[in-house]
Amino acid sequence: MKKKVLLGLLALTVAVVFLCGAGVTPSAAKDKIVIGAARPLSGPLAFFEANAFGPLYKMWVDKVNAEGGIYVKEYGKKLPVEMLVYDDKSDMGTMTRLLDKLILEDKVDFIFPPASTAFLFAAGAVANRHGYVLLGAEGGATTIEQMLPGMPYFFGLLNFSDWNQIPVLADVLAEAGAKTAAIMFIEDLHGIEYQGVAAREFDRVGIKVLMTKSAPPDIKDVSSILKEAQKLNADVFCAFVYPDTVFLTTGTAQAIGYNPKAFLLGPGGNFEIFRKIFGDEVIEGVMGEGAWNFKSSRGAKKFFEAYTARMPRETLDWWGHWFYWAGLECFQQAIEKAGTLDNKAVRDVLATEKFNTSLGKVWFTMFGDGGGLLAKECHPGEIGQWQKGIFEVVGPKDKRTAKFIYPKPAFPAPKPKPEAGK
């Protein structure tokens, strides 16, 4: 019996020596990086999954895996990426529960963000509670700047209200001669903040706000709001609303012949699908938030060509897509630099390094020992305007791809609907 035990111990010792000598450790069994997300696959926010960050993370995963994966020194090899995505049904409570499930039950290596500003803030709290890096995608607000010192794992990618869109918008409009404005905003975090920042920035440059009207997220008729703005004859009309209301507002303005000198739309007006819905003639001169296009740089052109080779052009987002892509490039480089899948180590790299991306050299402005936002200096543009079918960058001036058109051309009269049976 003693002899058998001794032989067994000897065999075990030889096996351990062999494994250690070969450089094999228990961690070498890792065969993939699993990234979880709770995304709006259905519900009113599903537009963003179909047209904003959704196409980008899928394209990024395909590219990474086509290259063999992400090299992680801890495992001594490249690991492919696998996505585990749940439908949050555009419900915030569902989204936060699913993030907890992904982290605690599924034990994913990393998480990706949900859609919309309010959801992103809620997800940031979950991510920081568990110590998981969270890149920001479709969302951003001044409110989060106050939260960032206590959210070290959050890294916002998108430009927003005073980071640095509305200050630039105010300067562009004032330089063109605008004196008055009317504002419509959606009754949620995004709309409330944008209208507040706009009121402050317009006042700074001498643009008087004549009207401020709120609208519920599910509004079905904006004609009364637009007619009031039309009656006031304000130079500028701003609609800080989401895509469904953006489309409704544009169609209504055309139908009633509302033609302010400047017409700015929130998320939705920056998407290529907006152009497809209304056509170049209707959207000529319409402004949107963003912005970039394939003329912004060689990196922009290369990204545009890569995207349209894989995805339909109508899914392009001229606000967020290039930001998201650069953020994913930073994320991959941070994992490689850290040499581990440990979120704390990856977080520290994101907080301190500068990254070479298709957007150029980018970095995060950090808030104390907390989280960060993609530095303003890295933004390719803040405000765009549709001109001859291209979403041109018109602000800030040093990043313009075209001169700002003011006043915008009038909306063409709606084409008569064909009679039934014809």
Image (tube, rainbow, N blue to C red):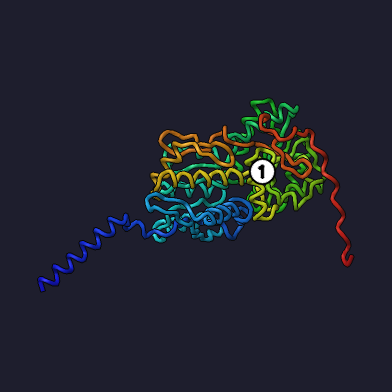
Residue 66's spot in the image, x, y percent?
54, 56
Give whichever of 85, 29 is nearer the camera.
29
Q: Residues within 10 Å of mark 1 (few under 14, many from 20)?
A: some
Give whichever of 114, 22 is nearer the camera.
22
Q: Where's the N terminus, which quadrant?
A: bottom left
The answer, for residue 93, to whether it is visible in the render is no
Residue 263 picture quarter: top right
Left or right of 6 on screen, residue 339: right
Residue 184's spot in the image, x, y percent?
68, 42
Name the amino acid, label 1.
Answer: Lys
The answer, for residue 354, to whether it is visible in the render is yes
Q: Where's the C terminus, which quadrant?
A: bottom right
Q: Quick check: 165 above or below 420?
A: above
Q: Which residue is mark 1?
A: 301
Per the image, label 1 sits on a secondary structure element best described as: helix
Give whichever of 379, 257 is nearer the camera.
379
